Image (tube, rainbow, N blue to C red):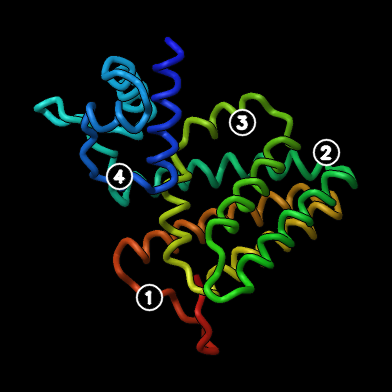
Amino acid sequence: MSRASDRAYERIREMIISGELAPGHALGEEALAHACGVSRTPVRDALRRLEADMLVSRSESQRSFVADWSLDEIEDVFDLRAILEARAAHRAAERMTDGALARLRDCNARIGRAIAVTPPDIDTFLEQNREFHAIVLELAASRRLSQLLGTLIEQPVVWRTAHQYGHGELRRSHGEHEELLAAFARRDAEWAGSIMAGHIRRAFHAYADAHRGLAPLETTNGRKRA
């Protein structure tokens, strides 16, 4: 691949993942070429790569669109993430160091500050949430896990889910990170894996509720439960 193709691929992928290009958005080669500062040929190459990544879909008329996954497809992704990220958390707990734990605590503290303001700083929440999970995966020290998780399209979904969150849902996510930190501090791999699996499943239900236009579920004491 040429440098121009790589540049177009990275730029278009960034626009999709950030939500700048929404699901179902038509991807015109000329407009994308202008946005990426390249000719149409590198854009065409980039769109083929993004189609293989399942970020772009192509119609029968060969027009390209930002992929718009069904709820069943999204659930499959979350199911796979729950399995793989739980395994990553299990391995990370076994390999945890004081320095790594400090990095995770610092990251979650930044999440806490981002969600404490009104309105919440969603961009910082997303950035630090991504960093938190990246640190866990780094500690897992498994190239295979990294490769498998890298094939799952999760960031556009996380972005859309987070922008539906109220303060309660954001606090719940932050609190689950705190539970993970407690498990990591004790080097308890089984506990860490269990918390991570639940963390990912709760995120799916938050996404599904937003997708269906439902309000967050209520607990028995009337507080919202994401």
Amino acid at pointer 4 = Trp
* Viewer-side residue, 203 vs 115: 115
The residue carrying mark 3 is: 145
Q: In which quarter of the image is residue 149?
A: top right
* Viewer-side residue, 144 vs 99: 99
Work out how far the residue at label 3 is from the one at label 4, CA to CA, in angstroms: 23 Å
Q: In this view, does 165 lie to the left or right of 54?
A: right
- Structural crowding at the residue carrying mark 2, measured as other residues with C-alpha within 10 Å and reported as few (<14), some (14–19) or many (≥20): some
Residue extending farthest to the top is 1
Amino acid at pointer 2 = Arg
The residue carrying mark 1 is: 215
- Structural crowding at the residue carrying mark 3, measured as other residues with C-alpha within 10 Å and reported as few (<14), some (14–19) or many (≥20): some
Q: Is residue 25 left or right of residue 16?
A: left
Work out how far the residue at label 4 is from the one at label 1, CA to CA, in angstroms: 21 Å
Who comes first in sequence, dot 2 or dot 4? Answer: 4
Who comes first in sequence, dot 4 or dot 1? Answer: 4
Tell me the number on the disc at residue 95. Answer: 2
- Mark 3–mark 4 contact, CB under 8 Å? no
- At x 49%, y 70%, the residue is 226
Amino acid at pointer 3 = Leu
Who comes first in sequence, dot 2 or dot 1? Answer: 2
Q: In this view, does 104 lie to the left or right of 127?
A: right
- At x 73%, y 63%, the residue is 178
* Residue 5 percent location from the top left of the image: 39, 17
Describe the element under mark 3 as helix, strand or loop.
helix
Residue extending farthest to the left is 61
The residue carrying mark 4 is: 69
Q: In which quarter of the image is residue 148?
A: top right
Who comes first in sequence, dot 2 or dot 3? Answer: 2
